[in-house]
Image (cartoon, rainbow, N blue to C red):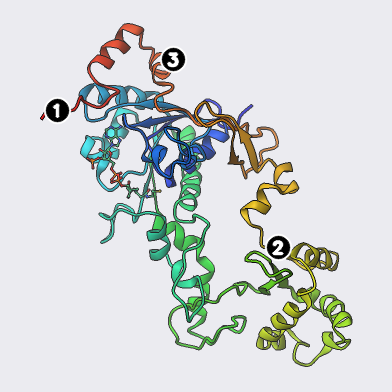
Amino acid sequence: MEALKDVRILDMTHVQAGPTCSQLLAWMGADVIKFEPPQGDATRGQLRDIPNADSLYFTMLNSNKRAITVNMKTPEGKEVFIALLKKCDIIMENFGPGVLDRFGFTWEKIHEINPRIVMGSIKGFGSTGPYSDFKAYENVAQAMGGAMSTTGTPEGAPYVTGAQIGDSGTGLHLAIGLLAALHQRDRTGIGQYVEVAMMDAVMNLCRVKWRDHQRLNRGNLAEYSVPTAQGMGATPRAGNDSGGGQLGNAIQCKPGGPNDYIYVVVQEAVWDALAQRMGAEMGMPGLATDPRFATITDRRQNQSEIWALMTRFAANYTKQEFMAILNPLNVPCGPIMSTEDLANDEHVRGREMYVELDHPQRGTWYNVGMPIKLSDSPAVIRRSPLLGEHTDEILHEVLGYDAERIATLKTAGAFSLPPKKKT
Ligand SMILES: CC(C)(COP(=O)(O)OP(=O)(O)OC[C@H]1O[C@@H](n2cnc3c(N)ncnc32)[C@H](O)[C@@H]1OP(=O)(O)O)[C@@H](O)C(=O)NCCC(=O)NCCS
C-alpha cells in the first residue's frame, strides 16, 4: 500500500520549490492535483528542448500528478476551487507575496471553508519581517541565506552551488512540515498553516557555517586551509575544505579533465594506512610518522602539503583507479561524478535513481528517481500530466459533477483564458 494513499493534495505550486515537494508526496502515494492557470505553470514552456512539448523543467518536477486548469479570476473558477478545497487534505502554494490574498483566499478564509485542511506556503522570506514583500528565486535564496558568501575561494567572487538548496531544499522542508501537520490533524481534526521561507531553509542547510561563525569569537578555525583569525567576523569561503571535523579536499587525477578529481577525507583513523600506501610508492617510507603530519594538529597545520603530495600520487591514476586504491584502506572518498558519469552509473541505475519514462509529446525521457526508499511502499514513477489532462476526470470523480455541469462551467470560462479583446 502506498504510504500516503487517501491523502489528497490541492497543489497550486509552480516553478521548482513547491512542485519538488508535491512530487515527493505524490511518489509516496498522495493524489496530487496540480491546479494550474489556463496557460499552465510557466515551466511547461521554459528551457524547451522539443518544440511544443512540455519542457524537462516541468516533466522532471511534476511526475505522478493529475492536472486541472482553473481560471481563478472568474467566479466559476473560484467556485471549483472552493469545492476542491472541501475535498482535499492539503493545499499548497508558492505564489509571490499576496497572490492568494488577492484571490480572496487568506489562510483564515481557507481554514473557515475546510477546518481540517493543512496549508503549505513557500515564500522567499516568509510572511513577516522587512523582506516579506519580496519575490525570490533559487539564487536569491542562496545569496540571502548564507550559502553564497561561504561558497568559493576567499580571493574570488561568491559562488552559487549547483544543488538547488533554495528551491528543492525548501521543498523538502515543506514536505516535513506538511506531514507533521497532517499527523496532528489526524489526532485533533484541525488543520494548520505551514510556512517555509527559502531564506530560512538555506540558513538551516548552512548550519555548520553558523557553527564556525560563532567559533571565530574564540579563535581561528584550525581545520580551514585559508587564513582565519579570532574576531574576523564572517565565516570565510574555504574552497573545497571539508567543513567538518575531518580534513578533506578535492584532488586532481589523471588525465586532468574538468571532472578528473576525487574528494578524499583524511579521517584521523586512516592516516597511517594512507600514508604508508602513498609513502611506499613515492619513496617516502616514513610519511606516516613525518613530524609535519604526525598528529592531527600537525596535519591541520600542514594540510596544503598533504594535498600537494596526494596530487602528485594521484597524477598516475584516474579518479576511479584512485578510488580503488583508497576503498580497501577504508579511506572515505568519492570521485567527482559528472552528470554523464551518473547517467551511466551501475549503482545509480540499480537504485532506480535515473529512471526511463515515456511521454506522449516527448517520447523517452529520464527522471531522477525517488531518494527516500520505503520498504513496504516503493515509489512507482509515472510521467507528468499534460496541461489540463485530468480536468474532466477530477471534476467528475472528485467533485461528482455531471457532464452538463462541466459543460456549463466550461462555457462560463472557468477553465480557460478569456477571449482576447478586439482592438
Ligand atoms: C517564483 C516567483 C518569483 C514568480 O513570480 P511571478 O511569475 O510574478 O508569479 P506570482 O506568483 O507572483 O504571480 C502569479 C500570477 O498568476 C496568477 N495566477 C496563478 N494561478 C492562477 C489561476 N489558477 N488562475 C488565474 N490566475 C492565476 C496570479 O493571480 C498572479 O497574478 P497577479 O500578480 O495578477 O495576482 C513568485 O511566485 C515567488 O516569489 N514565489 C515565492 C517564492 C518561490 O517559491 N520562489 C521559487 C520558485 S522556484
Residue 110 in picture, x, y percent from top left: 30, 33
Q: Which residue is depicted at the point 60% across and 82% down?
A: 225
Check disc 3 and report the residue beneath it.
Answer: 397
Q: Residue furthest left?
A: 423
Amino acid at pointer 3: Glu
Q: Secondary structure at mark 1?
A: loop
Q: Which residue is depicted at the point 45% across and 60% down?
A: 202
- Callout 3: CB less than 8 Å from ligand 1: no
Q: Residue furthest bottom?
A: 291
- Is any atom of residue 307 visible in this view? yes
Check disc 2 and report the residue beneath it.
Answer: 335
Mark 3 vs 2: CB contact within 8 A: no
Q: Quadrant of ligand 1?
A: top left
> In the shown orientation, is residue 283 left or right of residue 66?
right
Check disc 1 and report the residue beneath it.
Answer: 421
Amino acid at pointer 1: Lys
Label 3 or label 2, whichever comes before in sequence order: 2
Question: Circle 3: is it few (<14), some (14-19), or many (20+) Cα within 10 Å?
Answer: few
Q: Residue furthest front?
A: 51
For the residues carrying marks 3 and 2, which lies nearer the camera in this image? 2
Q: Secondary structure at mark 3?
A: helix
Q: State the CA–CA distance, disc 3 to disc 1.
A: 35 Å
The quarter of the picture where the C terminus appears is top left
